[in-house]
Image: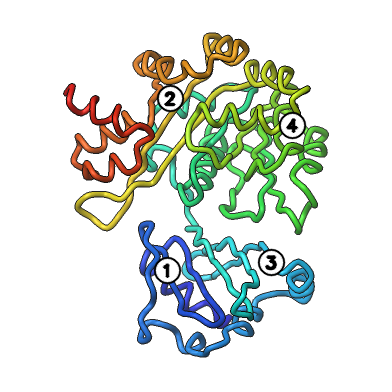
């Protein structure tokens, strides 16, 4: 057992999503969105030293140590073997206090279903297309990776496809069910997202999953894959449907944006934007959703640069297509007494409009 294991086990017992370890500072757990320090009594003995660098470096291979010393930061995955193998997405980094600091994102061994996570049937229907692109968006820590894993699992249980994932690092591990699932990790199995996507086109995929669309090359290859008859799933750190479309277009040079606009209008099958918001009467969080479903009307809107009409488009498509806007989702959670009104306002995209909507009911 590595010296880090008791600390990670404690985090799992406390249902923490993240563990922060500073070489010359306290250990913290993020529980339901709040960053809380561990008391002196709770901290495992191995971490009661001032400089925790050697404790952290213990789990690195020689190659990883060399990479860390060269780049001064390192992303990798770590497996904690309990009754089931738990995984952690790990980042090591240097900062001004010296030593090595680390953040561990805890990944449960079991993949939840979309229904378990609270997604409506419209999201499952979105996955029934054979080509195009679906974006899962939201701020960091909003559960995008879990949603993406649940979408892959939905396909893995109900289709007979070849699914290729490109991740940095691999978090949820998918076993073959009715699909073949090939998972590739940056640094271990490949060098860049874009190079892996180019290679994937020669590996007979049906579905391509991109852990994070970080740069122009990756987004460009994702759109190309969607255009060439594949279903592409990927995440972006954007807050709503309109900003997602704008972000994808604006990452390209001005002389390419018109062509990209046409590509998106043809390929976009849906955008799922999400936030995790604190619940009212229990120490937990629930999901608030914005769901945009593709259609010929949406394609025309994108081509004609009328994405400012997206809110009204989603409102009118709520019943027919199962679309949702974020503020309506928050208002619904408030009406069900799951979140407070203050929380709804805090997480809303337009608090004034939300106040008006509340007054109309």
How far apart marks 4 and 3 lie (CA) works out to: 27 Å
Foreground label between 3 and 1 = 3
Residue ID for mark 4: 220
Asked which secondary structure carries label 1, the reply is strand
Residue at the image point whose x is 71% and y is 50% from the top: 184
User: Looking at the image, what colour scheme do you see?
Assistant: rainbow
| Residue depth check, mark 4 versus mark 2: number of the one nearer the observer | 4
Reading the image, the residue beneath label 2 is 122
Is 134 situated left or right of 41 in this image? right
| Label 3 CA crowd tier, 10 Å (few <14, some 14–19, many 20+) | some
Task: Specify whether 81 is left or right of 229.
Answer: left
Query: In the image, residue 108 lies at what x, y percent?
Result: 47, 58
Task: Tell me where residue 119 appears, x and y as whole percent.
Answer: 39, 35
Q: Quadrant of the C terminus?
A: top left
Q: Name the residue under label 1.
A: 29
Q: 300 or 78: nearer the eye?
A: 300
Question: As displayed, is residue 86 above or below residue 203?
Answer: below
Q: Earlier in the sequence, mark 2 or mark 3?
A: 3
Earlier sequence position, callout 4 versus callout 3? 3
Q: What residue would you read off at disc 3?
A: 73
Give residue 189's quadrant in the image: bottom right
Crowding at dot 2, Cα within 10 Å, few <14 / some 14-19 / many 20+, comes out as some
Sequence-first disc among 3 and 1: 1
311 on left or right of 264: left
Instruction: Give the vertical position of 133 relative to 336 (above or below).
Output: above
User: Are discs 2 and 3 less than 8 Å apart at CB?
Assistant: no
Q: Earlier in the sequence, mark 2 or mark 1?
A: 1
């Amino acid at each position: 057992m590595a010296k880090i294991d008791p600390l990670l086990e404690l985090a799992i017992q406390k249902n923490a999503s993240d563990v922060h370890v500073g070489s010359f500072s306290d250990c913290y757990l993020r529980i339901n969105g709040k960053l809380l320090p561990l008391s002196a009594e709770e901290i495992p003995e191995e971490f009661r030293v001032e400089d925790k660098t050697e404790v952290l470096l213990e789990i690195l291979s020689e190659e990883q140590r060399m990479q860390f010393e060269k780049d001064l930061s390192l992303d990798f995955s770590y497996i904690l073997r309990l009754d089931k193998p738990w995984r952690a997405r790990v980042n090591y980094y240097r900062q001004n206090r010296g030593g090595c600091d680390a953040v561990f994102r805890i990944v449960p061994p079991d993949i939840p279903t979309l229904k378990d996570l609270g997604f409506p049937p419209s999201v499952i229907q979105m996955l029934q297309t054979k080509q195009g692109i679906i974006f899962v968006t939201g701020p960091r820590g909003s559960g995008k990776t879990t949603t993406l894993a649940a979408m892959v699992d939905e396909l893995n249980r109900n289709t007979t496809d070849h699914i290729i994932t490109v991740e940095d690092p691999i978090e949820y591990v998918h076993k073959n069910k009715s699909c073949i699932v090939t998972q590739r990790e940056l640094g271990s199995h490949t060098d860049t997202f874009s190079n892996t996507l180019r290679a994937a086109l020669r590996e007979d995929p049906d579905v391509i999953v991109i852990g994070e669309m970080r740069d122009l090359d990756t987004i460009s290859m994702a759109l190309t894959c969607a255009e060439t008859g594949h279903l592409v799933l990927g995440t972006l750190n954007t807050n709503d449907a309109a900003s997602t479309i704008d972000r994808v277009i604006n990452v390209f040079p001005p002389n390419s944006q018109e062509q990209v606009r046409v590509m998106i209008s043809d390929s976009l099958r849906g955008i799922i934007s999400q936030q995790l918001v604190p619940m009212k009467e229990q120490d937990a969080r629930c999901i608030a959703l914005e769901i945009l479903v593709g259609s010929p009307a949406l394609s025309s809107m994108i081509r004609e640069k009328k994405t400012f009409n997206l809110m009204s488009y989603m409102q009118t498509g709520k019943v027919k297509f199962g679309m949702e806007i974020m503020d309506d989702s928050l208002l619904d959670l408030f009406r069900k007494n799951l979140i407070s009104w203050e929380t709804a306002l805090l997480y809303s995209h337009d608090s004034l409009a939300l106040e008006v909507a509340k007054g109309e009911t």
